Image (cartoon, helix red, strand yellow):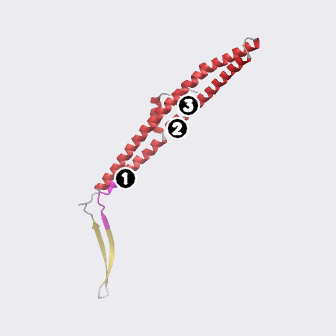
């Protein structure tokens, strides 16, 4: 069990989350769709060339070269609808990414709160309660050997010690679960932040 970093520090690492990396790829894909729609508004120049063979009556053959140029005039269709749709979808992806960031931020705040609570409980049990229960058990056991306490007192102090140890193990389990949850959100181990 080690000290936990602040929520602000963890929030700066939230950009490493794989979910947000997926959204970055989606944003670039939608921007490429906008660029493609814009390129559809510019007419394509078509150039063609070829040869043509003619047979003349006198038996002479004539070969000619044919060249053609085609330029569509964008009078009615400049792909305005396609461009608008691509921009809308790009904006939609940006908003969905922001929503994902907010959700991850809230999840990180909840996980950090659970981690801080578990850390406080583990340290309190480890530093105060567990040594107190151990010393009480040791004192009652020694008093039992000297005849000052009965067997029920020894068993009661032993039961209390076992309950405190069990509570400590449960708190340590919750702490480690919270650590894993925070590490999943920030994309790196907490030990590397020290």
Residue occupied by mark 1:
33
Badge 3 element: helix
- Discs 2/1, front: 2
Q: Which residue is drawn at 57% across and 21% down?
A: 124
| Residue 17 visible within the image | yes
Tell me residue 97's x, y (percent).
Answer: 41, 43
Mark closer to the chain start, 3 or 1 = 1
Badge 1 element: helix
Badge 2 element: helix
Q: In which quarter of the image is residue 118?
A: top right
Is residue 60 within the magenta segment? no
Q: What stretch is highlighted in magenta?
A: 34-47
Residue occupied by mark 3:
191
Mark closer to the chain start, 2 or 3 = 2
- Is 65 located above or below residue 157 in the figure? below
Q: Residue at x 64, y 27 (%)?
A: 166
- Is 155 located above or below residue 17 in the figure? above
């Amino acid at each position: 069990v080690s000290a936990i970093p602040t929520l602000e520090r963890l929030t700066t690492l939230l950009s490493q989350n794989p979910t947000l990396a997926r959204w970055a790829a989606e944003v670039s894909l939608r921007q490429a769709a906008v660029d493609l729609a814009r390129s559809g508004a510019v007419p394509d120049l078509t150039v063609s060339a070829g040869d043509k063979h003619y047979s003349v009556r006198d038996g002479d053959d004539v070969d000619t070269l044919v060249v053609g140029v085609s330029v569509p005039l964008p009078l009615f269709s400049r792909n305005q609808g396609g461009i608008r749709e691509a921009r809308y979808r790009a904006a939609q992806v940006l908003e969905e990414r922001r929503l994902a960031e907010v959700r991850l931020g809230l999840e990180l705040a909840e996980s950090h709160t659970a981690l801080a609570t578990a850390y406080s409980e583990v340290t309190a049990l480890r530093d105060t309660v567990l040594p107190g229960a151990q010393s009480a058990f040791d004192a009652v056991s020694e008093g039992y050997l000297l005849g000052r306490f009965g067997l029920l007192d020894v068993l009661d102090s032993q039961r209390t010690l076992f309950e405190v140890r069990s509570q400590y193990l449960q708190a340590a389990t919750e702490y480690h679960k919270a650590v894993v949850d925070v590490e999943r959100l920030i994309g790196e181990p907490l030990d590397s932040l020290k």
